[in-house]
Image (cartoon, helix red, strand yellow):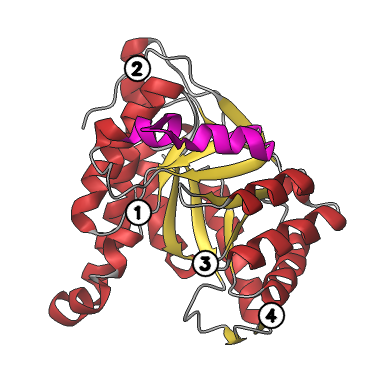
């Protein structure tokens, strides 16, 4: 993987003041930590959405601080397993930060209900729906259209199309199968963010390569969940090499994604922000400096190139 100028014109989207996309080196990588995720110690009841508000507030305050220091903006990945929980989390997050947030759940109905709730209370412009999948039903697409959601992640994973060069078929459609871009159009989505899917450590290589190829083909902001590369390895990694090694590898996975031209990275637990942000800021600065060869300069003075040294 090498960073270079992408010939295709690159889209830059702005959601609640956070700009995402562009050529490598133009904008800082947008980092996406997860909060209220499965097993998060601050959550006391996952179904009802009961959590330690003081600890959650402290985590967001630390996140704000490290984001300000490095220049890397953030989006919060708000995870919940029920609509009741997600609504409570949305209320809290929208009160404690002005950042945009993902609505994330393995429960499709909970995601839809949460998006509707966000629309009702006037927060829809800050919402990014996570996500539209190749397996999403027409009912979900129709429901998204009704809510008026404009920002969504397209999850570019199909077990029949795992190689990087094949991921464009997932977006465009193949063998009569509707592509994610058509599904997004039907849902009324205007700002598209593509997730190239990471399952484990080896698949991170494909996800990073696919990020470059999809930016080259379509120009949309692209990213991946680098944390997934480490999550299955985490317990063994801590047991065999220690907690420090595990933290290092989690940060390292995000760097691989950035070097693959990812515009955004879902890096895992919000608690990891203190060591993921500095590492990513350093690589962002290196990339931005190297892109001068192509006549590309950062589009903001808050870029890590100007902030961390």
Mark sitting earlier along the chain (3/1): 3
Query: Magenta stretch?
Result: 167-192
Residue 103, above or below 4: below
**Is 189 colored magenta in this rendering?**
yes
Mark sitting earlier along the chain (1/2): 2
Residue under the point 79% across and 52% down: 123
Mark sitting earlier along the chain (1/4): 4
Label 2 environment density (alpha carbons within 10 Å; few <14, some 14–19, many ≥20): some
Task: Identify the mark at residue 154; answer none if there is no mark.
Answer: none
Q: CA distance from mark 3 to mark 1?
A: 18 Å
Q: Which residue is mark 2?
A: 5
Mark sitting earlier along the chain (4/2): 2
| Image location (x, y in percent) of residue 298 | 49, 24
Task: Identify the mark at residue 106; answer none if there is no mark.
Answer: 3
Residue under the point 62% across and 32% down: 185
Answer whether residue 190 is visible to the viewer in this image: yes
Task: Please state which of the two labelled residues, at mark 4 or mark 3, is closer to the viewer.
Answer: 3
Q: Answer left or right for 240 relative to 161.
A: left
The residue tagged with tag 1: helix, strand or loop?
loop
Q: How many marks?
A: 4
Task: Please state which of the two labelled residues, at mark 3 or mark 1, is closer to the viewer.
Answer: 3
Q: Which residue is mark 4?
A: 53
Mark sitting earlier along the chain (4/3): 4
Q: CA distance from mark 1 to mark 4?
A: 27 Å
| Image location (x, y in percent) of residue 202 | 18, 53
Depth check, front residue: 88 or 113: 113
Label 4 environment density (alpha carbons within 10 Å; few <14, some 14–19, many ≥20): few
């Amino acid at each position: 993987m090498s960073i270079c100028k992408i010939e295709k014109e690159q889209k830059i989207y702005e959601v609640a003041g956070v700009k995402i996309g562009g050529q490598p080196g133009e904008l800082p990588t947008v980092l996406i930590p997860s909060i209220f995720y499965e097993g998060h110690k601050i959550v006391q009841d996952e179904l009802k959405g009961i959590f330690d508000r003081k600890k959650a507030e402290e985590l967001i305050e630390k996140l704000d601080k490290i984001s300000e220091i490095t220049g890397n903006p953030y989006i919060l990945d708000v995870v919940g397993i029920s609509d009741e929980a997600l609504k409570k989390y949305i209320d809290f997050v929208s009160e404690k930060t002005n950042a945009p947030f993902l609505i994330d759940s393995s429960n499709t109905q909970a995601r839809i209900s949460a998006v509707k709730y966000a629309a009702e209370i006037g927060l829809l412009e800050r919402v990014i729906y996570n996500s539209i999948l190749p397996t999403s039903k027409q009912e979900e697409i129709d429901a998204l259209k009704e809510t008026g959601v404009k920002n969504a992640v397209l999850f570019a994973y199909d077990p029949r199309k795992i190689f990087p060069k094949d991921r464009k078929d997932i977006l465009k459609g193949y063998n009569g199968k509707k592509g994610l871009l058509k599904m997004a159009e039907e849902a009324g989505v205007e700002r598209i963010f593509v997730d190239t899917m990471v399952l484990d450590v080896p698949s991170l290589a494909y996800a990073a390569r696919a990020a470059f190829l999809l930016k080259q083909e379509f120009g949309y902001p692209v990213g991946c969940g680098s944390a997934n590369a480490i999550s299955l390895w985490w317990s063994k990694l801590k047991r065999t090499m220690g907690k420090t090694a595990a933290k290092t590898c989690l940060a390292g996975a995000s760097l691989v994604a950035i070097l693959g031209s990812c515009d955004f990275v879902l890096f895992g637990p919000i608690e990891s922000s203190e060591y993921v942000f500095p590492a990513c800021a350093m690589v962002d600065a290196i990339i931005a400096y190297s892109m001068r060869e192509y006549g590309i300069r950062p589009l903001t003075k808050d870029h890590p190139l100007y902030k961390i040294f």
